[in-house]
């Protein structure tokens, strides 16, 4: 991806590179094809750079913005809450209220612990699964991203196909230098959406596996959906072998349905992790699950702690955001605009003779240029990503802020039908530019 900056934006980004490695505070924000995105301000479904250029934003901070940037109602609730303090070594009302709302919305969640980030949530969920079962091995699926900690940075969407082995005997591809090789022995990889390979692995190692962590929709891999019956099979196998089923709902939670993927697919996980849309951009996350498992989070059993867990800012944002979701004012607009985009992108690609597939739900969807439908990360890597990168670069440079490669589009309640119409116009312009 490449982004051409205006003069003031370029000047700012050069300043950033003097004090931040490559000008960013997260590797995910760096675009090596040219200028990386920078933001001077944001409001609703838009972000603005330092030259005043407006972008319709479908990155939405990688998914947290569910209501819209700088939502005045959420900001007001947070501002009021912090007048009574910010962090305490004690339980307070707002964290209880936020937890109550999560329990009310998510069918399989009995109890909740608030934490600070999606990575922190999945890290503690894995420890809890191991502590509860007395086993060490975690099974994860290729193409899934479960955070930035060492245990799960194996065979993510950025993995190297040459290093993942055969489908029947997958091996882990490191996403980063600095991952100790010894961790390979604690992670079992499996292709996504493949009941045969999963069944064979569990027949051999099922009683050694503490937990299966799974994105119910393959978020970083173009939002590929599960095959019919796949999630049900995973649930059945976990029951058979005494494995803790962990739904990583950092992306899908409170985004694809009010109760997340648990509600959408009607599958009861043992543990679930939430973040992103939980707080409309404020840093908040949660672990939730069955009471029997969650009550192991205590001295002498499973350690979970964090100075800022459940702080007033995070709890107030979560409480206010979830209240809006419970009131039913969020998803009708997202469904309408997101469906308009998904259908429009498919129609334009068909009309221009580009073989393609659009995956996901209106709140989070992706597309790929491919002759045959992809069902997992290995299939997806056969897509024409070079052409797609040219399309997306043209869109970004014409005011549509979207992600390159298999990352999905995210929608928020502030996006309008007019935004969708403009986006589809720019999308077709981009394809025509590539054809030329």
Image (cartoon, rainbow, N blue to C red):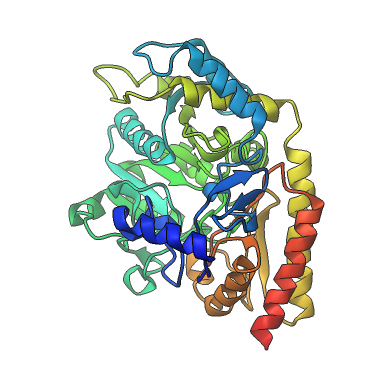
What residue is shown at x 69% (from left), y 78% (from top)? 431
Q: Residue furthest bottom?
A: 436
- The answer to whether 332 appears left or right of 280 in the picture is right
Nearest to the observer: residue 255 or residue 269: 255
Q: Residue at position x 37%, y 25% from top?
A: 308
Residue 419: give x, y in percent of width and height.
76, 55
Q: Nearer the viewer, residue 106 or 242?
A: 106
Q: Residue at x 53, y 58 (%)?
A: 193
In percent of width and height, residue 374 lies at: 58, 68
Can residue 105 be spotted in the picture?
Answer: no
Splitting the image into 4 quarters, where does residue 278 fall?
top right
Q: Nearer the viewer, residue 338 or 57?
A: 57
The quarter of the picture where the C terminus appears is bottom right
| 63 versus 287 height, above or below | below
In the image: residue 268, left or right of residue 257: left
Q: Is residue 334 left or right of residue 226?
A: right
Q: How many marks?
A: 0
Is any atom of residue 323 visible in this view? yes
Q: Position of residue 432 (x, y in %)?
A: 71, 81
Image quadrant assignment for residue 69:
top right
| Picture residue at 56% right of the left edge, 55% below the top | 49
Q: Nearer the viewer, residue 36 or 165?
A: 36
Judge whether 289 appears above or below 396 on screen.
above
Q: Position of residue 389 (x, y in %)?
A: 55, 73
């Amino acid at each position: 991806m490449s982004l051409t900056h205006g003069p003031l934006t370029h000047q700012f980004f050069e300043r950033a590179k003097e004090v931040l490695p490559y000008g960013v505070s997260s590797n995910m924000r760096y675009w090596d094809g040219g200028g990386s995105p920078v933001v001077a301000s944001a409001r609703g479904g838009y972000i603005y750079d330092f030259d005043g250029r407006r972008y319709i934003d479908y990155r939405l901070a990688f998914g947290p913005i569910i209501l819209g940037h700088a939502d005045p109602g959420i900001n007001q609730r947070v501002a009021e809450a912090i007048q009574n303090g910010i962090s305490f070594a004690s339980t307070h009302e707002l964290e209880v209220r936020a937890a109550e709302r999560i329990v009310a919305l998510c069918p399989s969640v009995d109890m909740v612990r608030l934490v600070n980030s999606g990575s922190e949530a999945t890290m503690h969920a894995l420890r809890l699964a191991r502590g509860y079962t007395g086993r060490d091995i975690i099974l994860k699926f290729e193409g899934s991203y479960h955070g930035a900690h060492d245990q799960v940075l194996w065979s993510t969407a950025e993995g190297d196909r040459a290093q993942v082995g055969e489908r029947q005997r997958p091996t882990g591809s490191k996403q980063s230098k600095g991952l100790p090789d010894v961790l390979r022995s604690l992670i079992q990889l499996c292709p996504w959406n493949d009941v045969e390979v999963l069944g064979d692995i569990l027949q051999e190692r099922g009683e050694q596996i503490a937990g299966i962590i799974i994105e119910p929709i393959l978020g970083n891999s173009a939002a590929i959906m599960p095959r019919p019956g796949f999630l049900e099979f995973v649930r059945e196998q976990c029951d058979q072998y005494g494995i803790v089923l962990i739904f990583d709902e950092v992306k899908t939670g409170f985004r694809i349905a009010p109760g997340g993927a648990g509600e959408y697919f009607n599958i009861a996980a043992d543990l679930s992790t939430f973040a992103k849309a939980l707080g409309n951009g404020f840093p908040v996350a949660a672990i939730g699950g069955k009471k029997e498992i969650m009550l192991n989070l205590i001295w002498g059993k499973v350690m979970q702690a964090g100075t800022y867990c459940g702080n007033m800012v995070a709890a107030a944002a979560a409480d206010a955001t979830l209240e809006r979701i419970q009131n039913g004012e969020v998803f009708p607009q997202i469904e309408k605009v997101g469906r308009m985009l998904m259908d429009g992108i498919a129609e334009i690609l068909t009309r221009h003779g580009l073989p393609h597939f659009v995956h996901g739900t209106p709140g989070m969807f992706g597309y790929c240029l491919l002759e045959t439908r992809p069902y997992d990360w290995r299939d997806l890597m056969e897509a024409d990503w070079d052409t797609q990168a040219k399309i997306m670069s043209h869109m970004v440079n014409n005011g549509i802020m979207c992600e390159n490669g298999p990352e999905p589009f995210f929608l928020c309640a502030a996006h309008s039908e007019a935004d969708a119409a403009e986006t589809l116009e720019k999308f077709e312009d981009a394809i025509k530019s590539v054809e030329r």
